[in-house]
Image (cartoon, helix red, strand yellow):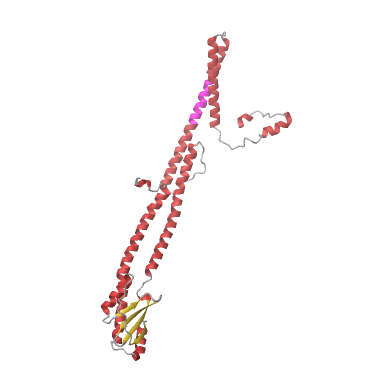
Amino acid sequence: MQLRDYLPKSLFSRMLAIILIPMILVQLVTVFIFYERHWDSVTRQMAHALAGEIALLADRAGNQMQAEDLPALQKSSGNYFGFGLAFEEGAILASTPPVPANYAEQAFFEALDSRLVWPWQADLRGDADLISIDIQTANGVLRIFVGRKRIFSSTSWSFLGWTIGSSLLLFCIALLFMRRQVRPIRRLADAARQLGLGRERVDYQLEGAKEVRLAGRAFRAMQHRIRRHVNERTTMLAGVSHDLRTPLTRMKLQTAMLPASPEISALEEDILEMERMVDGYLVLQERLGKKAVTTDISAPRLADRKCAPLCGRGCRPAGADSLD
């Protein structure tokens, strides 16, 4: 199996592939570059910014924080950072270190390790809207509640949605455009097929791109030359056939005046055969000069219907043979 066996066969599919393959490649490259910069740069910056605010709040609380210091700290943290605070006096954190589940959590944990000097724990999956960070102090555990959007950005899903939506929209536009471009080529092929069958395609119009119109003009010129050639051949055939009748008539006259003999009989048969050939040429010329008409051969002819009641048989008026 070769590569060309798997390639599109029709012009429509090939033109569509020429448009879609580069578009898909550009979209994939854009997505990969965005995700690399997003998860490596934006997420890391968000994690370091949040870790710095948490470290600042922990430094303000101090290692010797008491329960009566909580209201003031809650007010300042809510006004400046939008954090929620809780304090469990006498509590002790578990010694199990947190395990990151993705790159964003790993970046956030690394930022907390670099900013906090106290032991800490983080719960990033317990709530759909909030994350909690527990900091161990000398008198208890300070719990900080932070909005989940401060570390997990939703722009990635928006970007994916816009990417997929724009790709589908461009695909539909390309599909409509390709159909309009291929339609004139199909009509030109149909007109060429009708010409090959000896039928005239009178409704063919030049349309489409410049190259398709150029091919259409070449087809019309070819159709005109073929029609002119057929007409000239038919005219020449009719002229030769008519011109042959005069010498054949003279030959018939001369053989009729000669005494009968086997040679004269053979000559008369040759003359009759030549007359039949000439008659055949004339009939062919007459048929080529007529246009094809659609008729129902099973229906009785009008002449038969009019004549049958009068004479009782299927007679036909003079000249009816020339109408068939």
Q: Is residue 164 left or right of residue 97?
A: right
Residue 4 screen position, x and y as percent: 36, 46
* 103 is higher (above) or lower (below) than 145: above
Q: Residue at x 69, y 34 (%)?
A: 305
When asked about the image quadrant of residue 299, the answer is top right
Q: Residue at x 35, y 91 (%)?
A: 68
Q: Which residue is farthest front? A: 95
Q: Is residue 207 visible?
A: no
Residue 204 screen position, x and y as percent: 49, 44
When asked about the image quadrant of residue 66, the answer is bottom left
Q: Residue at x 50, y 39 (%)?
A: 194
Closest to the observer, 61 or 243: 61
Magenta stretch? 231-245
Q: Let me know if residue 35 is in the magenta part.
A: no
Q: How many marks?
A: 0
* 70 is higher (above) or lower (below) than 13: below
Q: Which residue is farthest bottom? A: 68
Closest to the observer, 23 or 177: 23
Please identify the dominant SS of the magenta region: helix
Indicate the quadrant containing the N terminus: top left, top right, bottom left or bottom right.
top left
Q: Is residue 55 visible?
A: yes
Q: Is residue 96 left or right of residue 166?
A: left
Q: Residue at x 45, y 39 (%)?
A: 221
Q: Which residue is farthest right? A: 310
Closest to the observer, 31 or 306: 31
Indicate the quadrant containing the C terminus: top left, top right, bottom left or bottom right.
top right
